[in-house]
Image (tube, rainbow, N blue to C red):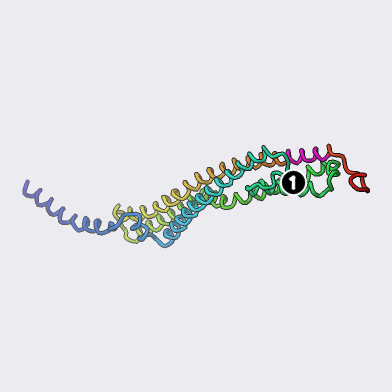
Amino acid sequence: MKRSLVVCLVVLGLLAEPAFAQEVAAIPHDLTVAGMFAQADWVVKTVMSILVLASVATLSIWIFKLWEVVSYRRSIAVALDFLAAAPSLGSAAELKDPTAAAMVGVARQELERYPAGTASAFADGIKERAAALIQRVEAAQQRKLSRGVSVLGSVGAAAPFIGLFGTVWGIMNSFVGIAQSQTTNLAVVAPGIAEALLATAFGLVAAIPAVLVYNAVTRAIAGYRVRMNDAAVQVMCLLSRDLESAQSVPPRKAGGLHGV
């Protein structure tokens, strides 16, 4: 009885050995990220390549926007201190910040449209037009700072779905392979599913930094916009002072020399 049991076990072992060898042979030799990428379907490869490019674009935009927003915030901080101490628009003409300098420039141009001593009579209109022109300067700067931010939002919103498409496509191919091989061995199924799930991982790797960078850049731009509003208020205050100074000086009499 014992001898028969031993013989049965040996026979079962010999029969199972080819199947085990086939299962081991079915497992790919390279299960790293690079290996799975190389063995993936061309559609899955395209999806993962797009997501890699999206990640590179996110990193590039983040570096550029960080430098841009930080430099502009430092520049306008200096301009705010200068505007707060300036007695008039003329003394604020040498501002180095381009946004604040443009605000002062449009306010001076509107003020200088009228001869000396007569601008005070049109003070309300001058202030209204200067405020509208300053708003245009702010809007132009806002558009300039917002360049590339929409790319971050698009990557953060679309990258998970792009990765999911690659995963669905890869799993479909895995099921087709299962049907063609007519086997449900885990060694045959697992590599294809792992390659498909790699696309979802790429999508998350591209989307998570994009969302974080988008929120950080949006907050930084909002803070800069507050400082632009402060600069606009300071310029309008200087314009109002200049108009009051012009009103307090009586116009010269026409004709004669030296006011005679």
Q: Is residue 100 left or right of residue 58?
A: right
Determine the residue positioned at 51% across, 46% down.
Answer: 213
Q: Check residue 41 for magenta coloring.
A: no
Instruction: Tell me residue 11's x, y (percent).
Output: 13, 54
Quarter of the image where the C terminus is located:
top right
Instruction: Tell me residue 249's x, y (percent).
Output: 84, 39
- Per the rendered image, the range of residues in magenta is 236-246
Give the image quarter of residue 233. top right
> Which is more toward the observer, 128 or 169?
128
Query: 10 Å neighbourhood of mark 1: few (<14), some, or many (≥20)?
Result: many
Q: In the rendered image, which residue does mark 1 sit on? A: 107
Q: Is residue 88 visible?
A: yes
> Which is more toward the observer, 89 or 126?
89
Residue 35 vertical position relative to residue 77 in the rendered view, above or below: below
Instruction: Tell me residue 59's x, y (percent).
Output: 48, 51
Judged from the image, the secondary structure of the residue bearing numbered disc 1 is helix
Instruction: Tell me residue 145's x, y (percent).
Output: 60, 49
Q: Is residue 32 left or right of residue 99?
A: left
- Main SS category, magenta section: helix
Q: Check residue 243 for magenta coloring.
A: yes
Q: Is residue 11 left or right of residue 136?
A: left
Residue 8 vertical position relative to residue 43 in the rendered view, above or below: above
Q: Is residue 175 left or right of residue 111?
A: left
